[in-house]
Amino acid sequence: QERLVESGGGLVQSGGSLTLSCTASGFRLDHYPVGWFRQAPGKEREAVLCISPLDSRAKLVDSVKGRFTTSRDKAKNIVHLQMNSLKPEDTDVYYCAVEDRSYGLGSMRRIAYDYWGQGTQVTVTS
């Protein structure tokens, strides 16, 4: 039984939008730092953004700044990755991750995270 499940991936045209969802079972997502990562074949898994329960401001990498945001639906225990103005270079498998540090500050480092979703494919065509 998976504790972290992602959904919402798909194929979109360049300039389009897509929203990914991360759902948790057995724990509250809003108590922990949540990170979004992406990985292309043969490349390292890299951070996209993260959010901490202690700060509503998300940390983002420069390549997605102004285009991607994350939000918490606390009532439904869901974290969303909202992706706008998508580019072909955004084509990757996207992962949701949770750091097992209650009310931690969050991290953009992959090794900081303890739980990972299965990944969902996002493909952006030209």
Image: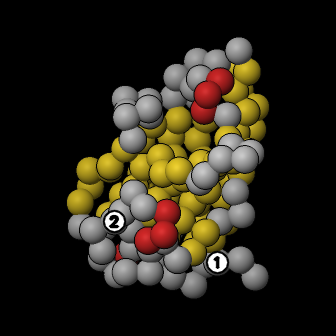
**Which residue is located at x 71 percent, y 63 percent?**
118
Q: Which mark is residue 111?
A: none
**Looking at the rendering, in which quadrant would you find the N terminus?**
bottom right
Q: Which residue is mark 1?
A: 3
Give the number of callouts: 2
**Which residue is located at x 34 percent, y 65 percent?**
106
Residue 3, position as x, y percentages in the image = 64, 78
Residue placed farthest to the left in the image? 55
Residue 27, position as x, y percentages in the image = 51, 82
Decide: few, some or many residues near mark 1? Use Cα within 10 Å; few <14, some 14-19, many ≥20: few
Q: Is residue 74 above or below residue 95?
A: below
**Is the Cβ of the residue at disc 1 closer than 8 Å to that at disc 2?**
no
Name the residue type under label 2. Gly
Residue 9 visible in the displayed image? no
**Which residue is located at x 72 percent, y 47 percent?**
42
Q: Earlier in the sequence, mark 1 or mark 2?
A: 1
Q: Which residue is mark 2?
A: 106
Q: Secondary structure at mark 1?
A: loop
Q: Is residue 67 above or below residue 44?
A: above
Name the residue type under label 1. Arg
Q: Secondary structure at mark 2?
A: loop
In the image, taking residue 95 as reference, residue 27 lies left or right, namely left
**Which residue is located at x 44 percent, y 34 percent?**
64
Q: CA distance from mark 1 to mark 2?
A: 19 Å
**Looking at the rendering, in which quadrant would you find the C terminus?**
top right
